[in-house]
Image (cartoon, helix red, strand yellow):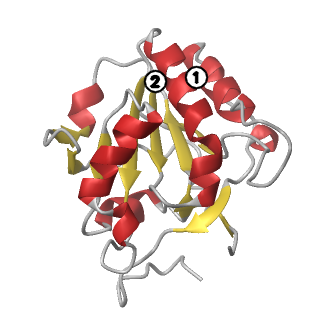
Amino acid sequence: MVATHSTMLPLGTPCPDFSLKDTEETTISLDSFQDAPALVIMFICNHCPYVMHIRAALANLAKEYQKKHVAFLAINSNDTELYPADSFECMIEEKSSAGYSFPYAFDETQEVAKKFHAACTPDFFVFDKNRHLNYRGRFDSTKPGSNEPAIGEDLRRAIDSTLKGISIPEAMQKPSVGCNIKWKSGNEPDYFG
């Protein structure tokens, strides 16, 4: 298990547009969330131990903040030929098994991951009501194999600040650490490796 860090996209970056199919066969785009006061976009997958470590806490956190109208979108950009556990069919099963209440979309071409400079799973991005990046980085400080339970304190603080219109200082933004996105051969972005 080789750990990869977030690229830490510059704060204030406008949210890239996208159009992806989710596990409900719905087309999801940036416009799908236009009324949300904050938008959390996360790059995850099914098999990554770092994602598996936080999946229950992530499901609970999302349900809590969806009551405040915060929008969440999970995106899987992994190469499913080499990693069949991340296939679209397995994503449908994972969404149900994990109790995810948010759309889980498949980035088959990996172009959306590149737009976000996503590097690892999990990788989190929080956009404000104007869809400018206010936070990027980790869920919390825990990792697989640690005795600490995942509670998502970093992401929680980021969402709370974003809802209040507060810019999050650079010092409070820690890179996420996880498995690298499984790029298709020849499709690796220039920021990879």
Q: Nearer the viewer, residue 142 or 17?
A: 142
Task: Please determine whether, in this image, residue 59 is positioned above or below residue 191.
Answer: above
Q: Quadrant of residue 130?
A: top left
Instruction: Determine crowd level at label 2: few under 14, some 14-19, many 20+ residues with C-alpha closer than 10 A.
Output: many
Task: Give amino acid for label 2.
Answer: Ala
Mark toward the start of the polypeptide (2 vs 1) = 2
Can residue 15 be seen in this snapshot?
A: no
Contact check, label 2 and label 1, Cβ < 8 Å: yes
Task: Give amino acid for label 1.
Answer: Thr
| Horizontal arrangement in the rendering, residue 118 relative to residue 17 (left or right) | right
Q: What residue is rendered at 58% in x and 17% in y?
A: 165
Residue 16 % position (x, y): 34, 49
Residue 162, which numbered label?
1
Residue 38, which numbered label?
2
User: SS for tag 1?
Assistant: helix
Q: What residue is rendered at 30% in x and 66% in y?
A: 111
Quadrant placement of the C terminus: bottom right
Q: Nearer the viewer, residue 89 or 37?
A: 89
Outermost residue, right direction? 147
